[in-house]
Structures are given as C-alpha cells and as structure tokens.
Image (cartoon, helix red, strand yellow):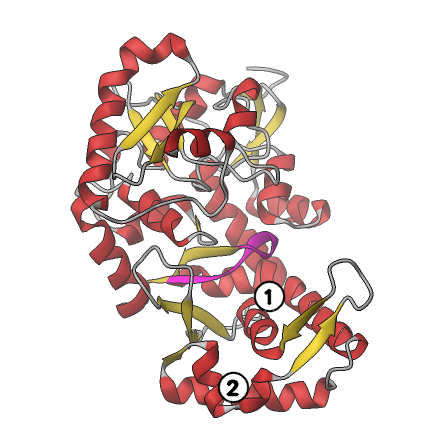
Amino acid sequence: MSGGRRRIGAAERRARLAVRHRLAGTERATSPEEVAASLVALHGTDPATVFVAVGARLAEPAKTVPATERALYEDRTLVRMHGMRHTVFVFPTDLTAVVHASTALDVAARARAKLLKDMAKGGGPDAAWLAEVEASTLAALARRGQATATELAEDEPRLREQFVYAAGKGYEAMHTVSGRLLRLLGVEGKVVRGRPLGSWTSSQFRWAVAPAHPELDPAEARTALLRRWLTACGPATEADLKWWTGWRVTDVRAALRAIGAEEVALDEGVGYVVPGDLEPVTGPDSPWAALLPGLDPTAMGWQQRDWYLAPEFRPPLFDGSGNVGPTVWWDGRVVGGWARRASGEIVWRFLDEGVRRAAEPAVAAEAERLRGWLGDAGVTPRFRTPLERELSA
C-alpha cells in the first residue's frame, strides 16, 4: 500500500498486458472480434496494422486474413471509422455509437466548420451547395452499396469541384470537394471505409454508408468508453486517459467519477482502475515473446510508457511524429524492433542485449509464425521509423 492506495508495480502491469491484451501464447484469441474487444480499438490508419495486430494475438494465425476480412466487410462485426484524436480506428460494432457520441461529435463540428471556411477562402461554393452535394452523395452511396470517390463523382459530378487551399502560403494546393467531404462524412459517422481496392494491405478504400446506431448522450458515452478502456488497459494515469481519448481533462475526471474509478499507486503517481479491479494479477508461468506491428494499440496505449518501454529505445522505434514502428516484446517489455524485407524474411534486432540469450528462440519462433501467415504480402509500415528502415534495407 502507498498512501492508503494499493500499489501496482511495473511487473504486475506487464502481467496484465500478457493476459488482457492476448499476447501470451496461453491467452491468445479465437477471432478478430475477440482481439478487438480485448483491446477496445485497433489503429486503422495503416491497414496492415489491423491484420498484423490481430495475427499476433490469434491462436490460429492462418485465419488472420480471411477472418478479419469477414469481420470487416461481410459480417460488419468490426467497423473502421474515425475515433479518438481524429484518428481512424477499427472498433467492435457495438462501440460505434459510444465512440461517435463520446469523441467524434466535437471533432466533426470543428471539421465541418473548417471545410466551409477553407472553401469560402478558396473561392469554393457555400454551405447550402455543400449540403445538396452531401445529400446526393449519400443517396448515391446507398444505391451502390460501396463505391470509390471516383465512382461517386460519376453519380454526383459536383464532387469534382476544386478550390484553392491556403492561397499564397508555401503549402498552397488545390483541394477537391470529394476528398474533403468524404473524410468529413467519415468523422461525422455517416460513412465508413469499406473493402480496399487491392489486397488487405492496400490504403485505397471504397466507402460505404455507416451502420445505423442510436444517438447517445455524450457524457454517458464518455463514461462507457472510459470504463471499457480502463477495463482493458488499467491501471492508467489521468494523463494517459486524456492522451488516449483526446478529451478535455474535465471530461476525463467526470467520467472517472461516473464509473467510480478506484485510485491506485503507480511509479508515475496516482493511477485508476475500474471498480473491483484491485486484486493482484499474475501473468503466465513462463516468459512470452511477441512481434507487434507499427501503431499497435498495446505499444501506443499509454502516454507514459517507461514501465514497458525504456526511454533510450524510443529514438530508433518512433518516427518524428510519435508513431511507433514494429516492436519486439519479451515478457511485457519492448526489447527491440523488427521488419519484413522484400524477400519475405522477417528480421529483428534486440535493443536490450541483456535478454538476447533467453528471448531469441521465442522471438525466432514468433517471426516464423508471422512469416507463415503473411505469405507474399508486404507490410511496410505507413510511418517509417529509423530501425525499421535500417532492418528492411
């Protein structure tokens, strides 16, 4: 105990990761839906992240691609949509209403205001015109089921309208209404990304009308989302929660009060867990290894990461914007990075040489497991990091 609070040290936090994030071999999941539910959200900015994050946690990794495509594009049990911090994620479908109300509404309002402002400055049409085009586009998308921006412009030619963005600035450019409007509709929860044009690694998507969901009270939705995330990722500090959600600190504190979060003592200070989550958690009996993709939700889950990622390892593993690259894990800590070469070979490097002897056989087995289900698919991260570039060369 520390100051009347139960202390949860780094070792126990890493044990929670092994179990709750489905990383230890004995804890692996049976489906992509189970993986997503365990993690709350999968980063979806880079399409490959979703599949590799799922594959790392499935008991039968050969099912990764067909099962994830089924969940995303056929059963719609998983949905790729905008969420926290204006970022694209993959969520369980039952969370779409919660995410929309808790985080996307405020972002969407700002995004629409900015689009109208940019159009006005660039000599583009007005709000009434945009509303007409929006309604026509959504009707065309409903008729088609799924469509690219180019296909939608065949039905609604005004989507091809252009306007000048940032006139007179060094980054002046011509923006097309279709690109900006479809992204806005995505943030507003009216459309979602559908099946890609190419393979599962492609970043070019068709669009589809978003699944219907109830409109929730934003405060209640924030409470529901925080409870879900803290169950999967607790304990966490207030700073972690504010960073992950993108909310104002007052909203974070209100949600913590609403769920009756319990305070614990962490190395970083005061942390929080959901009610009833104070019992000690033990990890698997033996150490475990994992190869996680760039932007994996475990690696990106907390703002304060020293308990699983040594500060000196960050420069080679992160890009200049704070995006993590592919990481090698050993028993709850990041100990190196990995990459896939053009030949298909999975290569890695230990940044913590102290674990090499114990960890290398298990890491090699994970690399072979990954290569086995990847086949010929390329998984070059969208956000390249120094170590990944070096290893893949």
Q: State the mark number for residue 217.
A: 1
Q: Nearer the viewer, residue 87 or 262?
A: 87
Q: Is residue 202 above or below residue 51?
A: below
Q: Is the residue marked by circle 2 packed among few (<14), some (14-19), or many (20+) residues within 10 Å?
A: many
Which residue lies under the disc numbered 2? 137
Q: How far across and down, in percent of the image, does residue 193 sit?
A: 43, 67
Q: Is the residue marked by circle 1 packed among few (<14), some (14-19), or many (20+) residues within 10 Å?
A: few
Q: Earlier in the sequence, mark 2 or mark 1?
A: 2
Q: Residue at x 55, y 22 (%)?
A: 306
Secondary structure at numbered mark 1: loop
Q: Residue at x 61, y 62 (%)?
A: 218
Q: Is residue 360 above or below residue 258?
A: above
On the rendered structure, is 376 left or right of 3?
left
Q: Residue at x 18, y 40 (%)?
A: 372
Q: CA distance from mark 2 to mark 1?
A: 28 Å
Q: Which residues are magenta?
A: 79-87
Task: Indicate whether residue 311 is drawn in magenta.
Answer: no
On the rendered structure, is 223 left or right of 46?
right
Tell which tag, 2 or 1, sits nearer the viewer.
Answer: 2
